[in-house]
Amino acid sequence: MKKTIIITGGAGFIGSHVVRLFVTKYPDYKIINLDKLTYAGNLENLRDIDQLPNYTFEKADITDAKRIGEIFAKYQPDGVIHLAAESHVDRSITNPLEFIQTNVVGTLTLLNAARDAWKGNMEGKKFYHISTDEVYGSLGETGMFTEETPYDPRSPYSASKASSDHLVRAYYHTYKLPINISNCSNNYGPNHFPEKLIPLSINNIKNNKPIPIYGKGENVRDWLYVVDHARAIDVIFHKGVIGETYNIGGHNEWTNIKLIKLLCEIMDKKLGRAPGTSAKLITYVTDRAGHDLRYAIDATKIKRELGWEPSLQFEEGLEKTVDWYLANEQWLNNVVSGDYEKYYAKQYNR
Ligand code: NAD
Ligand code: TYD
């Protein structure tokens, strides 16, 4: 069956992997990548597929109701997969308002556009909202987040994502908008912006710069390879029961310090350095304000009901990620220098 799908945030880290998967796996679908191209949006992420006939790019801000309405009228989408967001916790601590604008007001704007466009005929339509495990708050040493865990966000980022999740559910109950939500754990892999822990550390190790570890490095995250997240999004978009929420995770918990030590070992091997060389760059720095101690996802529901599970072991995925960053030095240098933003300003005349 043919479908027209708007994917928001398709130029970002996870969005670009979702766009690639949908464009290549479903040649009959029309995929519209709707992205504002903030500092985190980079069309270079999609260079390998951007000439395919079923791919279109629309530069737009999800808070711009008029423009979003025009895009819905132009394409008449059957589905929305909504990834566009401000996504970095540290930035949310310095500038919370931007997170409320994009993550809350932007999501509301898209919900309104979908409701207007699908009024009277919701059959076969779906608004799929991509969220995070951070909405559930912080775990102690034991336990896991299930779909029933009460929301307890503790950073401006997670509070803004929690608000957007609540709005999506409210539109399901109030207006019968056909929705799904998924809450995923930390992703890693190619095209990850080098402000986040793993790509930042790869870049610093490569350049012999200190690796900043917040606090004691004892905080725990549950890591999932980004392509496995994209596969889960595909499964939920096609098979997810309307109104349901699905947790997505790798059953792969690491303290930050153990993870960075493993990354240092891999980097030593790849860069031909003596064992222990990169680990000398580890530097403990002031902790993040309100730093959540531990996240861990119970992904039983999606496995049991939709048959999804992660395909990669962490060591394998981390090695693949390092290989990608070392082979794509130009991508990394362009992002770090901000050259890509100048390129798009010129390319899109904005
Ligand atoms: P990202 O920061 O790499 O990309 C975000 C994208 O959204 C960028 O392309 C940016 O240009 C676009 N964008 C931002 N503001 C916009 C606006 N106002 N209008 C249109 N486009 C806009 O983020 P990511 O890491 O790929 O995360 C994508 C989604 O997945 C987010 O909703 C995030 O909350 C969620 N998520 C991320 C992780 C993770 O580990 N990265 C884990 C779980 C969930
Ligand atoms: P991050 O990649 O920012 O993801 P999130 O905060 O959404 O989980 O951070 C992952 C973990 O790494 C988190 O516990 C904070 C920590 N961290 C550092 O120790 N140093 C850093 O430079 C960064 C960016 C993060």
Image (cartoon, rainbow, N blue to C red):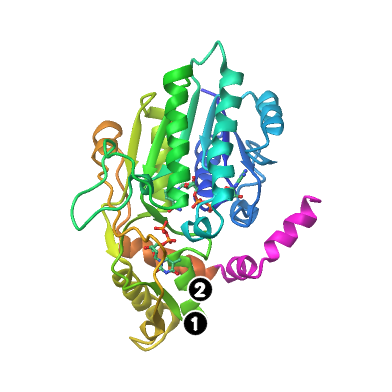
Residue 30 percent across, percent down from the top left: 60, 32
- The answer to whether the residue labelled 2 contacts the one labelled 1, judged by CB atoms less than 8 Å apart, is yes
The residue lying at 37 percent from left, 89 percent from top is 274
Residue 20 seen in the figure: yes
Crowding at label 1, few (<14), some or many (≥20) Cα neighbours within 10 Å? some
Residue placed under numbered mark 1 in the picture: 209
Whether residue 193 appears in magenta in the rendering, the answer is no
For mark 2, give the secondary structure.
helix
Residue bounds of the magenta highlight: 328-350
Q: Amino acid at mark 1?
A: Lys
Q: Quadrant of residue 131?
A: top left
Residue placed under numbered mark 2 in the picture: 203
Q: Amino acid at mark 2?
A: Asn
Residue 108 percent across, percent down from the top left: 55, 32
Instruction: Using the image, determine if residue 31 lies above or below residue 311.
Output: above
Image quadrant of ligand 2 equals: bottom left
Q: Is residue 298 left or right of residue 271?
A: left
